[in-house]
Image (spheres, rainbow, N blue to C red):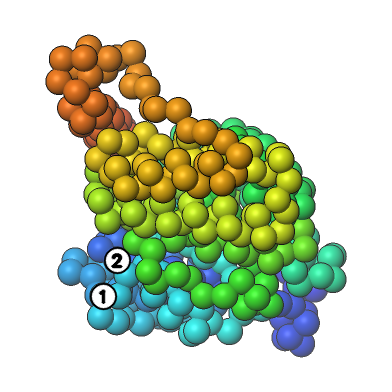
Amino acid sequence: MSNPGTMNAAVASNELPLVSILIPAYNAAPFLADTIRSALSQTWPLKEIVVVDDGSVDNTLAVAQQFESQGVKVITQKNQGAAATRNALFALSKGDYIQWLDADDLLNPEKVESQIRGAMGEGDARVLYSSGWAYFRARPHKARFTPTGLWNDLSPIEWMTRKLELNLHMQTATWLVSRELAQAAGPWNTKLLGDDDGSYFARVVMASSRIRFIPEAKVFYRISSASRLSHVGRSSVKMEAQFRSMELNIQYIRSVEDSPRVRAACVAYLQRFLPFFYPEMPTIVKRAEELAGVLGGRLRTPRMSWKYLWIQKLFGWTAAKAASVYYNQCKSWALRTWDKTMFRLEGGASRRW
């Protein structure tokens, strides 16, 4: 993508921006090595890679330390949670741009460089850069990149409106954020035990001048177990955190624009997530209904999928919802097991993405 001789001369004269690739890690030993390798393989030459082990009880720290000889900086701390770990990473970083990378995800080799190339032609540190992303289980080469309404150059208000009204999102590693923009958005919210990334990047988006989509950049988002932080499940603590993040998202967008379209998008957002809280969390359901009323809308009682209607009629909503959650967990486990088996049969060839 670039001329090595010209690039090396520019690096020597410090004309290029430094990119900090920041990796928070907690009990991530099975995947961390591949994640670090994807960071090391970035074609952008001026980069620092920092890993903070958040008090893991497996051998995450030992895995990370294997890469110190290649220039990876590794820090360990007592367990403080994902948001606090990311704040610690940012404080340790020196980069002009920040690349967040979860400990089980992967970047394609040109990800950072293609976005930095776009940034160097802008001259505006408040432009935010996004990229395409796709799910995978064990074999990255099986990932399928499917564009959404967010895979475009957009204004901050249009990006947030589409996110809420169409139930879309961008994965954490898709973003390349300037230090100036990150400082304007403020730190990660350590009080959120769920959707802390959604809340954080909503603030980053709203603090940006515009979002620029770079199609050459790609992120591979690993589907791991349902115990991951982003999985809400039936945890009352995570449900509360999820709803608090939703309230913040609505607050952020309405602070910039409070048009009928924005209000309708916020109501659609509340409606879509209502089944997560109904009927186990009546207090949250009531808060959601009240907020929808303030927005000029009204929430409908959630309806169970036809596959579980008979369970709902015989045993109630809670039993039907539990059956749905159990079925999805079993399905996810079966798909992961199949993909891992194929990975082994292919001799690990899937590591070449």
Q: Residues within 10 Å of mark 1 (few under 14, many from 20)?
A: some
Which secondary structure lies at badge 2? loop
Toward the viewer: 186 or 30? 186
Toward the viewer: 156 or 75? 156
Q: Earlier in the sequence, mark 2 or mark 1?
A: 2
The residue where tag 2 is placed is 26
Task: Note whether 55 is above or below 329 in the view shown.
Answer: below
The percent position of residue 266, horizontal first and vertical second, equals 58, 43
The residue where tag 1 is placed is 79
Q: Residue at x 76, y 49 (%)?
A: 154
Task: Note whether 304 is above or below 177 in the view shown.
Answer: above
Residue 344 shows in the view = no
The percent position of residue 57, horizontal first and vertical second, equals 18, 69
Question: Within the image, what quadrant is residue 33 found in?
Answer: bottom left
The percent position of residue 207, horizontal first and vertical second, equals 69, 66
Question: Within the image, what quadrant is residue 334 found in?
Answer: top left
Amino acid residing under circle 2: Tyr
Which secondary structure lies at badge 1? loop
The percent position of residue 227, horizontal first and vertical second, equals 25, 50
- On screen, residue 35 versus residue 217, left or right, reads left
- On screen, residue 347 versus residue 352, left or right, reads left
Q: Residue at x 41, y 48 (%)?
A: 287
Q: Residue at x 57, y 52 (%)?
A: 250
Q: Residues within 10 Å of mark 2 (few under 14, many from 20)?
A: many
Residue 293 shows in the view = yes
Q: Are marks 2 and 1 in contact (CB under 8 Å)?
A: yes
- On screen, residue 167 versus residue 207, left or right, reads left
